Image (tube, rainbow, N blue to C red):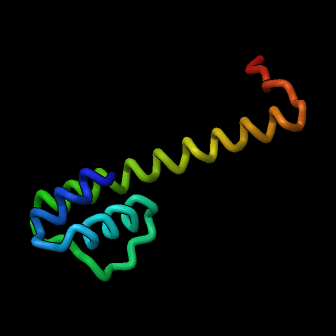
């Protein structure tokens, strides 16, 4: 996400801090709308950041659920 944010900042002519801010706001699917990419490449990269953020949030939630199950001493649920 950091790399994509820096690329978007370069393409859009934004300061590097704004590119990083944009990538994290987009990756966390917050989307304030204060920074909006205008170029087609930036928009495509923003979509990629959004999808990556959704996947990352899902993985973090799954790890948290598994840790909770382990800490409570529950066995894994069988698929039978």
Q: In which quarter of the image is residue 72?
A: top right
Q: In this view, does 37 lie above or below 4?
A: below
Report whether 58 appears left or right of 15.
right
| Furthest-bottom residue in this view | 34
Residue plotted at (28% across, 70% down): 17
Report whether 24 appears left or right of 7.
right
Report whether 19 appears left or right of 12.
right
| Furthest-right residue in this view | 73
Residue plotted at (12% across, 57% down): 41
User: In x, y percent, where is residue 47?
Assistant: 28, 56
User: In x, y percent, where is residue 66?
Assistant: 72, 36
Residue plotted at (18% across, 65% down): 9
Quadrant where the C terminus sits is top right
Residue plotted at (26% across, 77% down): 35
User: In x, y percent, where is residue 51?
Assistant: 37, 50
Q: Is residue 42 above or below residue 79?
A: below
Q: Viewer-proximal residue, 24 or 39?
A: 24
Q: Quadrant of residue 75?
A: top right
């Amino acid at each position: 996400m950091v790399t994509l944010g820096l690329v978007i900042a370069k393409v859009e002519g934004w300061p590097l801090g704004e590119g990083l801010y944009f990538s994290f706001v987009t990756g966390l699917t917050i989307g304030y709308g204060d920074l909006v990419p205008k170029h087609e490449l930036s928009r495509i990269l923003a979509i990629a950041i959004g999808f990556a953020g959704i996947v990352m949030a899902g993985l973090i939630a799954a790890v948290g659920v598994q840790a909770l199950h382990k800490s409570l001493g529950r066995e894994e649920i069988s698929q039978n």
